[in-house]
Amino acid sequence: MFFVLSHSGPRSDVTSTVMGMTTSASVPAGPEGAISAGTVTDRLVDANARYAAAFTDPGMDARPVLHVAVVACMDARLDLHDALGLELGDCHTIRNAGGVVTDDVIRSLTISQRALGTRSVVLIHHTGCGLETLTEEFRHDLEMEVGQRPAWAVEAFRDVDQDVRQSMQRVRTSPFLLHTDDVRGFVFDVKTGLLREIDPA
Ligand SMILES: [Zn+2]
């Protein structure tokens, strides 16, 4: 069921890359396609070692340079920094399944604005989101499977434009935020890379 949301399918390209890069003796050589969680993480840790080797402390303040917080879906096809021309230190990025404005997103936005000086909020949903294929039945199915219903809502939606509008509304009406006058919402097209702005009305 969770595979509805995932980008499953053959990943032999990644597999071969991983296998080619895992020279550490601690990583067992497995058959093609048998990536354990450890080997993927090892790949990331290896990449970090190279990153850190070239890294120089930019001496930045934690306050985002552009005073903006971006709330977006966690979708793997959405590279926020590249897509929005953002540099290190420019913004807060808050991501979850769907880019939904949950209580926890409001928590992060509240801290972002009140403790770290952001003033603008950008909301980004996208085409082909996994949440369009789910319903709240997902919670019921989970309960049937594991014997416990999750406390959280799935926040599935049918109309991405309307969901962006609802998200904007949740931000604008939050009593905890200092700045709700510059809240804009968009749908990112995963095929063209373009943002389409959603009229809040
Ligand atoms: Zn999504």
Image (cartoon, rainbow, N blue to C red):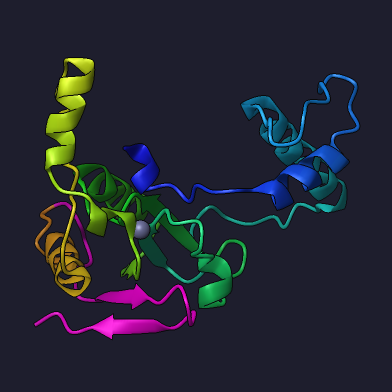
The image quadrant where one finds the N terminus is top left
* Residue 135: x %, y % from top left: 15, 48
Q: Residue at x 20, y 28 (%)?
A: 142
Prevailing secondary structure class for the magenta stretch in the rendered image: loop
Q: Quadrant of residue 140?
A: top left
Ligand 1, seen in the image, is in the quarter at bottom left
**154 to 142, vertically: above or below:** below
102 sits to left or right of 62: left
191 sits to left or right of 98: right
Residue 197 sits inside the magenta stretch: yes
**60 to 47, vertically: above or below:** below
* Residue 176: x %, y % from top left: 16, 51
**42 to 88, vertically: above or below:** above
Q: Residue at x 57, y 55 (%)?
A: 61
Q: Nearer the viewer, residue 56 or 28?
A: 28
Residue 167: in sight, yes or no? Answer: yes
Magenta segment, which residues?
Answer: 176-201
Residue 135 sits inside the magenta stretch: no
